[in-house]
Image (cartoon, rainbow, N blue to C red):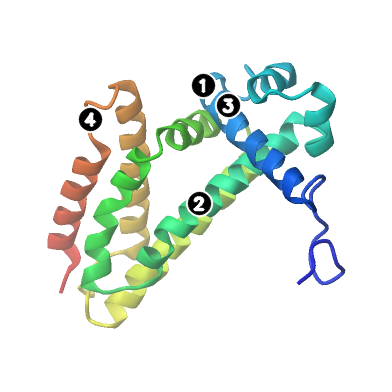
């Protein structure tokens, strides 16, 4: 598929040439770092331009608004997490259930992304904003994929028949969210990796056939 052709979505500004794609990637990386440190409201376009080493006009060429830049950062981080977790979500057998224990390690491996997720979701709790809708959709997608995996495992006889896939999915997400916050506020003393492994071991004891 040709970039920007009628067969696909239009290219983002500055992405048709390698230099433009490189600059856009640098902007996203710098913006991820600043948004994670200062939040959306505490970060100005001027701060972003200075962090990245670009003029305000150069930044606006690639991203016409701060909201557009944050949305691009969130979409990029979601693609990264999808790459890391997709196989572990879409297969329902005992091996992949055990691999869910590594979700905490995945989050620890990228502290900037973890801080970004916590801060951005907290800043955009008010209903009706585009970012509130984005986070609601992200939670629903992740929860639904977990539910489908639990249901497939139950139907295949890997899991017991007398458990609630929706409740198990909600508990897993709540555990991940709580661990992210505790990990950040304890400067890493509460280990997401260790706590998630502990949680999954006890979940297996509840639901494995």
| Residue ID for mark 1 | 37
Viewer-side residue, 22 vs 56: 22
For the C terminus, the quadrant is bottom left
Circle 4 packing at 10 Å, graded few (<14), some (14-19), many (20+), is: some
| Residue ID for mark 2 | 80
Query: What residue is drawn where x is 37% and y is 60%?
Result: 166
Could you tell me residue 189's position as x and y percent?
Answer: 22, 26
Alpha carbon of mark 3 to alpha carbon of mark 4: how far? 23 Å
The image's mark for residue 35 is 3
> Upstream in the sequence, badge 1 or badge 2?
1
Circle 1 packing at 10 Å, graded few (<14), some (14-19), many (20+), is: some
The image's mark for residue 189 is none
> Upstream in the sequence, badge 2 or badge 4?
2
**For the residues carrying marks 1 and 4, which lies nearer the camera in this image?**
1
Could you tell me residue 93's position as x and y percent?
Answer: 26, 74
> Upstream in the sequence, badge 3 or badge 4?
3
Circle 2 packing at 10 Å, graded few (<14), some (14-19), many (20+), is: few
């Amino acid at each position: 598929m040709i970039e920007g052709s009628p067969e696909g979505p239009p290219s983002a500004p500055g992405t048709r040439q390698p230099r433009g794609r490189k600059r856009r990637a640098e902007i996203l990386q710098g913006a991820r770092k600043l948004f994670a440190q200062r939040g959306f409201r505490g970060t100005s376009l001027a701060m972003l331009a200075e962090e990245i080493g670009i003029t305000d006009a150069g930044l606006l060429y690639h991203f016409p608004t701060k909201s557009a830049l944050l949305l691009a950062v969130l979409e990029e981080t979601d693609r990264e997490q999808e790459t890391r977790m997709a196989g572990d979500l879409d297969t329902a057998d005992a091996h992949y259930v055990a691999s869910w224990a590594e979700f905490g390690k995945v989050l620890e491996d990228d502290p900037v992304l973890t801080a970004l997720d916590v801060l951005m979701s907290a800043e955009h709790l008010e209903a009706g904003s585009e970012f509130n809708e984005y986070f609601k959709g992200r939670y629903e997608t992740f929860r639904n994929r977990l539910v489908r995996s639990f249901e497939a495992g139950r139907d295949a006889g890997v899991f017991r028949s007398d458990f609630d896939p929706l409740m198990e999915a909600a508990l897993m997400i709540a555990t991940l969210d709580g661990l992210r916050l505790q990990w950040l506020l304890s400067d890493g003393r509460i280990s997401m990796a260790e706590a998630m492994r502990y949680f999954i071991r006890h979940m297996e004891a509840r639901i494995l056939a």
